[in-house]
Image (cartoon, helix red, strand yellow):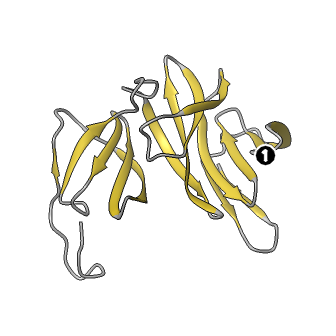
Amino acid sequence: TSFDKGDSFINSKVNMRGSLRVNDFTYVRQDGDLLLFAASNKGLLVSRDIGSSWFPFSDIEKKIDGAYLYNFTSNLQNPKNLFVALEKDGKGYVYRSDDAFFTVEKIFEDKEKVLALEMRDQELYMGMSDGRLLSYNINKKTFKLEASSEEPIERLLLDDNQSVYVSD
């Protein structure tokens, strides 16, 4: 963690045993507090002290507890509207939360993993382990196959010109 724009770094305290791989970070402001979240191979981690210490965290119903979390994205029009791609019990999922992961709603389940998420306007794009690029309209709650590749889609980038970049 760096508190000086990357000039120096300190080790964060992680309150978890075993090997940990952090795949992504996001944050949300909740009642004036800054909550940092980390997507990891051991589930969701939270920091309430700007990254000095991290603790395991799960939704109230434990729907995402113990899952392998790949990455996050948020709706720029509503920053509290967070999405997370994860793997649990051998399946790929996307969950949505409007309250800093206290509750989550499953919006997608598939036999393939969801490796990448990005959002533009009301469209959530999903890069799949089987090479599919899917989009989900969060208002209409409809899915669309945008493209297919022979390789897994591990990274997505959406730019302001309506372009979609994928990396496999």
Judging by the rendered image, the residue that carries numbered circle 1 is 139
**Residue 66: image location, x then y, percent:** 36, 26
**Which class describes the residues within 10 Å of circle 1: few (<14), some (14-19), or many (20+)?**
few
**Residue 88: image location, x then y, percent:** 48, 23
Q: Residue at x 19, y 71 (%)?
A: 9
Q: Say if 59 sits above or below 164 in the image.
A: above
Where on the picture, by quarter, is residue 140? top right
Specify whether 31 is left or right of 109. Answer: left
Q: Residue at x 39, y 28 (%)?
A: 60
Q: Residue at x 44, y 41 (%)?
A: 101
Specify whether 78 is left or right of 38. Answer: right
Q: Nearer the viewer, residue 145 or 131?
A: 145
Secondary structure at numbered mark 1: loop
Q: Nearer the viewer, residue 16 or 96?
A: 96
Q: Quadrant of the N terminus?
A: bottom left
Q: Residue at x 66, y 45 (%)?
A: 153
How many numbered callouts? Answer: 1
Query: Going by the picture, which residue comes out furthest to the top?
Result: 89
**Residue 25: image location, x then y, percent:** 41, 55
Specify whether 116 is left or right of 100. Answer: right
**Residue 141: image location, x then y, percent:** 79, 37
Specify whether 64 is left or right of 139. Answer: left
Q: Amino acid at mark 1?
A: Asn
Q: Say if 73 sits above or below 159 in the image.
A: above
Where on the picture, by quarter, is residue 106? top right
Query: Going by the picture, which residue comes out furthest to the front?
Result: 31
Q: Say if 125 sits above or below 131 in the image.
A: below
